[in-house]
Image (tube, helix red, strand yellow):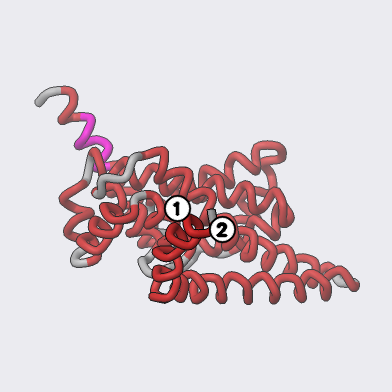
Amino acid sequence: MNRRLASRLGLLLVVGALIAFGIAFRESLSIGMLERGLDDLGAWAPLAFIAAYAIATVAFMPGLIFTIAGGVLFGPVFGTLFSLTGATIGAMLAFLVARYVASDWVAARAGGRLERLIKGVEREGWRFVAFTRLVPVFPFNILNYALGLTRIGFMPYALATFICMAPGAFAYTWVGHAGAETVAGGRSGIQAILIAIGLLAAVIFLPRLIRRVKTDPSVEQRDETKPATSEGGR
């Protein structure tokens, strides 16, 4: 057995163990568990949180709990940054695993959705990745792996993932922050809840707006007539 094959099998075993761990413990994962685990780490807590989020993403564990926990533990700004960084690193790792280690397994798990992803990426490139991050038409964890089997480049994938996950990350981080402020009491808790409701409404409405723009034929017609109109205006 050559070294390359041995390395590939080793990585495959590690990923398989992480996924098995994630499936086994996903029901017991909670914000309280994360808070207790990070309490004694001091200055290392942000790095530990980012690493845990990245591993959880690879292991098919629910990222929403981590994002909300980020708001509880670190506040809306740093919580968003740490959550977004952890989720993006995890998405990048899953992408690389699918592309170089476990393509057959990912193809089998993605099923018919893989063909849709491949066609979408071939048609629109990084814009399709951006769309799938803004509009949750595919499950987040399997999407990270499945996109590794398309022709999208690694850096366009990573940048589109980081930028387009930011609105949702900020909204749900603020939910965690609002919950913590409410528990602490005072008028700031009520204000935080109102802001959280507004952000969630925006995140829920955004996918509908994007779908409408993408499927509205009048938008394409306007785009087609714009060059002729501008040339006539000159």
Q: Residue at x 36, y 39 (%)?
A: 154
Q: Are marks 2 and 1 in contact (CB under 8 Å)?
A: yes
Amino acid at pointer 2: Phe
Q: Residue at x 48, y 47 (%)?
A: 88
Q: Judge by depth and name the residue closer to the eye, 75 or 111.
A: 111
Q: Secondary structure at mark 1?
A: helix
Q: Residue furthest top?
A: 3
Residue 21 in view: no
Q: Which residues are drawn in magenta?
A: 7-13
Q: Judge by depth and name the residue closer to the eye, 41 or 206.
A: 206
- Residue underneath mark 1: 56
Q: Residue at x 49, y 76 (%)?
A: 208
Q: What is the crowding at mark 2: few (fewer than 14 residues within 10 Å), some, or many (at least 20)?
A: many
Inspect the magenta stretch and tell me whether residue 223 lies in it.
no
Task: Residue 175 in the image: state x and y as whole percent.
Answer: 67, 68
Q: What is the crowding at mark 1: few (fewer than 14 residues within 10 Å), some, or many (at least 20)?
A: many
Considering the whole magenta stretch, tell me its main secondary structure.
Answer: helix
